[in-house]
Amino acid sequence: MKILVVEDHAVDIKLADLVLSTAGHDVRAVEAAEQAFAAIKEDRPQLILLDLDLPGMDGLALARQLKADPDTRDIHVVAVTCYPEQYPKAAALAAGCDAYLLKPINTRELSDQLTAVAEGGGDAP
């Protein structure tokens, strides 16, 4: 599966890339929401792993824009945050995210969780 990781922390990018690439996914990463638009046009992902706390445009605003656009609304979006009080699950789902994960992510389950979301298995635990 093609996965776009939108994350501003280099360590989290490396971790997601290592875990998901090892599981056989095609992973690309960008560090800001604004960069995600160009990456999506260049090589459309099936799923976006989206950190909600980003510099500039936050992940919720990006999710809303993606879900409002007929060209991108069918891309699965999985929100990730370590600030549930600032970015609660209800807000992420209302913005159009398909699932919500809290950091630190469970590296043993991440690939299966994302695959379940992409296959229509609903919200990741």
Image (spheres, rainbow, N blue to C red):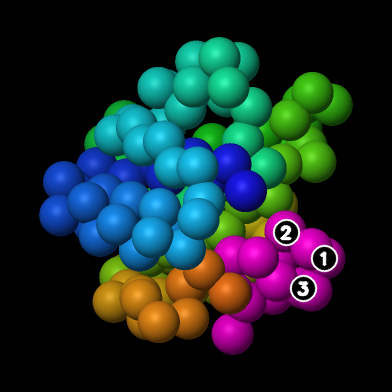
Q: Which mark is residue 118?
A: 2
Q: Secondary structure at mark 3?
A: loop
Report which quarter residue 57 is drawn in.
Answer: top left
Q: Is residue 65 magenta?
A: no
In contact (CB < 8 Å): disc 3 and disc 1: yes
> What are the residue bounds of the magenta stretch?
113-125
Outermost residue, left side: 11
The residue labelled by disc 1 is: 120
Question: Mark 1 belongs to which amino acid?
Answer: Gly
Q: Residue at x 49, y 22 (%)?
A: 39
| Residue 50 rendering spot, x and y as whole percentages | 46, 50
Q: Residue at x 52, y 51 (%)?
A: 25
Say left or right for 30 vs 23.
Answer: left
Q: CA distance from mark 1 to mark 2?
A: 5 Å
- Contact flag, marks 2 and 3 (Cβ < 8 Å): no
Q: Percent from the top left, x then y, of residue 33?
A: 42, 31
| Amino acid beneath label 2 | Ala
Contact flag, marks 1 and 2 (Cβ < 8 Å)? yes
Q: Secondary structure at mark 2?
A: helix
To which residue does mark 3 refer?
Answer: 122
Give the camera-side residue of 116 and 89. 116
Residue 51 lies, in percent from the top left, at 39, 53
Q: Is residue 80 above or below residue 51?
A: below
Q: Report the amino acid beneath label 3.
A: Gly
- The answer to which of 119 and 49 lies nearer the viewer is 119
The structure residue drawn at horizontal position 47% and vertical position 72%, both measured from the top left corner, is 110
